[in-house]
Amino acid sequence: MPIHKVSGPSRSIILAVFRAASRFLPLFFLLLLPRPLYANNASVTNVSLVEQDQSANTIKVEFDLSWDNAWSDSINKDAVWVFVKYCTSSCGTIPAAWSHAILKTSGTNPSGFTRGTKGTTAFDTLDIVVPSDKMGAFIQPSHQGSGTVQFTDLQLVWDYGANGLSDATASGSSVTVEVFAIEMVYIPEEGFYAGDGGTGNAQFEMGDGTQDLPATVNSEGGITFRNDSSGSYTNAYWFYNSDNNGYDEPDGAPFDVSEAFPKGFHAFYLMKHQIPEDLYVSFLNNLTSAQASARFPNQFGNDRHRVTVSGGTYSTDRPGRSCGYLSWMDVAAIADWAALRPITELEYEKAARGPLAPVAGEYAWGTTSYTSCDTLSGAEDGTATCTSGNVNFGNTTFTGGDGGAGPLRVGILATSSTTTREEAGAGYYGNLGLSGNLAELTVTLGATAGRAFSGTHGDGTLDSDGDATNDDWPGFVSGSGVTTGNGSGERGGSWLDTQTERITVSDRYNAADGLSTRENDRGGRLGRTAP
């Protein structure tokens, strides 16, 4: 018989709905061309624990899942990354002690996992893909199509024995679970260009630094940076261009990038949007007081930032707005908590450009034209739109909405009337906001601390100070966690930039700056290597 384990007020973010009777907020997905580009919503509801198996030390986490305007085609698909947090006592207090649930079995549609019952939906079936570390699951359409996803009674098998819980504790009346679901885009394995062959600041190229030849990534093999002064181009060395901002290698520096460094050739999943404020709020509310305090930007009211705290509970009244004032340590911490990882600057370029030949000076939507959004129509409650424009850029003070200058709601540019990548400001595979809005915090190739990154995933657990604990991640200090920004940088430009070059795909002006401070124009998005 069902064991009901949901209690207390729900916490909803733009990407998930969790504990008890839940509400959902507008959310923005993107369809790849030639299909229309829409804004939409996602919802996880009716979370419960059922079917405990004491012999196997497992119990099933059951929930309903829906989202609109999903797609799956011959190129790629969208998905949600679903993971479970649990609390065993005093779960209604602030703060409570939450831990990350380990699932039972890896693979596609593992035994015991249930793909749910189809509702009013364009898809007949979903796939549940559990990676080898069993920290969560990708849930995605299992066949080609587009439209609404709506399924009830999906079930993930929680291996509470692997979490060290007894049968009695797992079935106790005090146990509470939260289910989180983050929108992702599946980016397939294929080669791409890094750099656009132009003369933009510090961009990647091959040769001796004078030929302006875009580099190519055709495998996950190591990369050799040298100054190929022969001019013959026969060795196909990469040439390093310094960003001249302090922390990276000098022009033409010789160094090697290991095979372990994620280069974007292999398939990976990448958040469809930048981290929105309500995801960050849910992250803060899932931490201890000390951890949350360390990760709280405390910038309410500045540059359209709306994350605040009262009585120990964090909240925002602009849930879908891209969350600014994030440091590298903040992005690393939320990645570790969600069992995801930071992305590299090469993965950023892959997501924006795809396999297409580069265009000099191109933005993430593949052209050299842009129109800045400067006027908002409607209230900024999830329904506001830009009256024109495909990027938030130029330190614009908005007319309409909340006014002011700063980041916009994620996905605001994708509406029912946008039919092209350019109109929606979309990358090749469907990721939104890769140019402008907030700068993307990424792992750099230009510093030793960045090149040490091997792409490990978070394990859902931070240290007591609220820091990520992966020792290959940039900024990791032994005994202290990820406590510096060494090896990080930013790509894609932001709302604050006024030079158009900053929002181009290949620009590396701040690509290796070691970003340990919180700035009003910095955000991020998270990824995961495909199983």
Image (cartoon, rainbow, N blue to C red):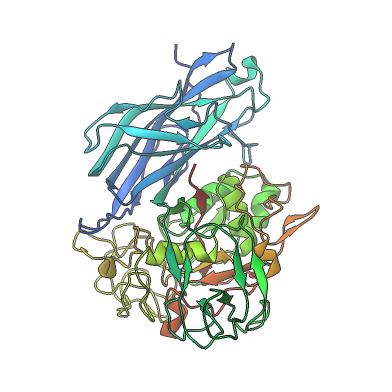
Q: Residue furthest bottom?
A: 210
Answer with left or right where residue 223 lies relative to residue 14. right
Q: Quadrant of residue 257?
A: bottom right
Q: Position of residue 83 (x, y in %)?
A: 51, 38
Q: Nearer the viewer, residue 356 or 473?
A: 356
The image shows residue 274, relative to residue 522, as above or below, that is: above
Q: Position of residue 366 (x, y in %)?
A: 32, 72
Q: Nearer the viewer, residue 22 or 1?
A: 1
Q: Position of residue 190 (x, y in %)?
A: 41, 56
Q: Quadrant of residue 23?
A: top left
Q: Residue at x 63, y 45 (%)?
A: 287
Q: Nearer the viewer, residue 287 or 236?
A: 236
Q: Is residue 324 visible?
A: no
Q: Is residue 497 visible?
A: yes
The image shows residue 55, relative to residue 232, as above or below, that is: above
Q: Residue at x 44, y 83 (%)?
A: 501
Q: Residue furthest right?
A: 479
Q: Nearer the viewer, residue 241 or 168?
A: 241
Q: Position of residue 526 (x, y in %)?
A: 51, 55
Answer with left or right where residue 13 lies relative to residue 311. left
Answer with left or right where residue 40 lies relative to residue 4. left
